[in-house]
Amino acid sequence: MRKLDDWRTRYGEEQLVGFTETPQIIEIVEELQERLRGNYPFHHPQYAGQMLKPPHPLAWISYAIAMTVNPNNHALDGGPPTSEMEKESVAELAKMVGYGETYLGHLSSGGTIANLEALFVAREIHPGKAIAASSRAHYTHKRMCRVLNCPFIEILDNPDGTVNWDMVEERRDEIGTLVVTMGTTGLGEVEPLAELLPGLKKAGIRVHADAAYGGFFKTVEGFLDSDEHWKKLPEADSIVIDPHKHGLQPYGCGSILFKDPAVGTYFKHDSPYTYFTSDDLHLGEISLECSRAGASAAAFWATTKLFPLTEDGLGVYLKSTVRAARSLYKLLTKSERFECLNKPELDIVGYFPVPNRKTVTGVTELSKKLFKAGTEAAPKEGFHLSLYTLSASAFRVHFPEYEADSETVTLLRSVLMKPEHEPFINKLSTRLHTLLDSCKE
């Protein structure tokens, strides 16, 4: 902070308002720390529930330092250095996905807003046409279509539980843009981009790749079973990636990239007091958002300096998370006491303890008991998982021997997105088996 303090003093002595009540500030900070202890242990590998983990120390240090200045990346005069950092960071993202130097993009406050911008452009390019997405896509797409007053088509599942992509061909005249999810937030499924692209191009349907969760796995595409689909990512018309997921950033840091920079005309607007300091592009001129924290750009920029968006950089972390998921899958499928719903494509595993009664209700009840037992046994012998609900019919495609005595079934789900998870998997498996003994049916 010394260099920033030297910079501040060049402008004279500061009159800091509200910073003289030191005892009260200390008391409040102490209370804050105590209240934060009520969180789940997102930092620890025994937390394998939702997509939550602390950012890398360099990210939060950089964010905190930049926030003492509090730059706003909407316009260049609101944050000249952090605006440049954002442009540099987005250039690295564009290079990672294969867009090269011709693109348009920026950071956002999160994946929801980034997807809103992608769907906004989709609506403007094909007014009156629908945006389509599979039933596994994030719920934000359907919600944002309501915001945009744009038709939405849900691509339903076949009876065997697979996505009925034939619906796209059947309704090709209605669809302007198809959302292809590169890493669903449910089970980390990579939708078949390579298989879909030829038909979509022939029909003149745009492709939006929602890679909010999976985008950074592009750095290790050769390490994944879904390699063929990642190779085709540069052919998507727009791509959303969330640095606050696998990019080691604090919330909110999302990003949106457009392959054709000409779509910037759809964001065209004017401001009587904002864009006067420079003839260079202001980030607010290509965004639906106005004020955005320049600190987010500073944090992401710093982190990509330490972990370049390459296989040998950030990719080292991502390979570790994939190995963790594969290890848990292997251990549970070898066990007679657990079944896995999916072979992990990325780093999410869905599974359940085998009940005495082969019914979907039995699966739900035992899964919930084990979920609760893990939380109660923390911190020393427990774990924190998440629950995943799907239709009984989809479940029975994989496990037809189970009686469908309920319309839905609830399983256990583990998001293994921390590199600390890989060495913890054997311990997690042991705890799952041990605590299952205490769960009476």
Image (cartoon, helix red, strand yellow):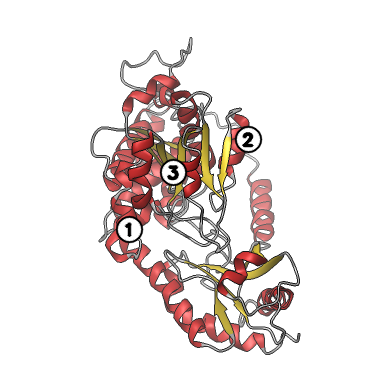
Could you say whether the residue bearing mark 3 is in a helix, strand or loop? helix
Residue type for callout 1: Leu
**Looking at the rendering, which quadrant does residue 206 occupy?**
top left
Residue 13: % across, % down: 47, 28
- Tell me if residue 254 comes above or below residue 231 in the rendering: above
Which residue does the image show at 48% across and 39% down from the upper left? 67
Looking at the rendered structure, which numbered label has been put on residue 165?
A: none
Residue nearest the viewer, comparing 44 with 181: 181
How crowded is the residue under tag 1: few (<14 C-alpha within 10 Å), some, or many (20+)? many
Give the quarter of the figure containing the C terminus: bottom right
The outermost residue toward the front is: 170
Amino acid type shown at disc 2: Gly
- Within 10 Å of disc 3 (Cα), the crowding (few <14, some 14-19, many 20+) is some
Q: In the rendered view, does 281 fall on the left or right side of 42?
A: left
Looking at the image, the residue that sits furthest to the top is 272
| Sequence-wise first label, 1 or 2 | 2
Q: Quadrant of the N terminus?
A: top left
Q: Secondary structure at mark 1?
A: loop
Comes first in the chain, label 3 or label 2:
2
Residue 154 image position (x, y, % from top left): 57, 44
Residue carrying label 3:
65
Q: Residue at x 63, y 35 (%)?
A: 18
Identity of the amino acid at label 3? Ile
- Write down the residue under mark 2: 18
**Foreground mark, 1 or 3?**
1
Q: Which mark is residue 314?
A: 1
Residue 38 visible at all: yes
Circle 2 SS class = loop
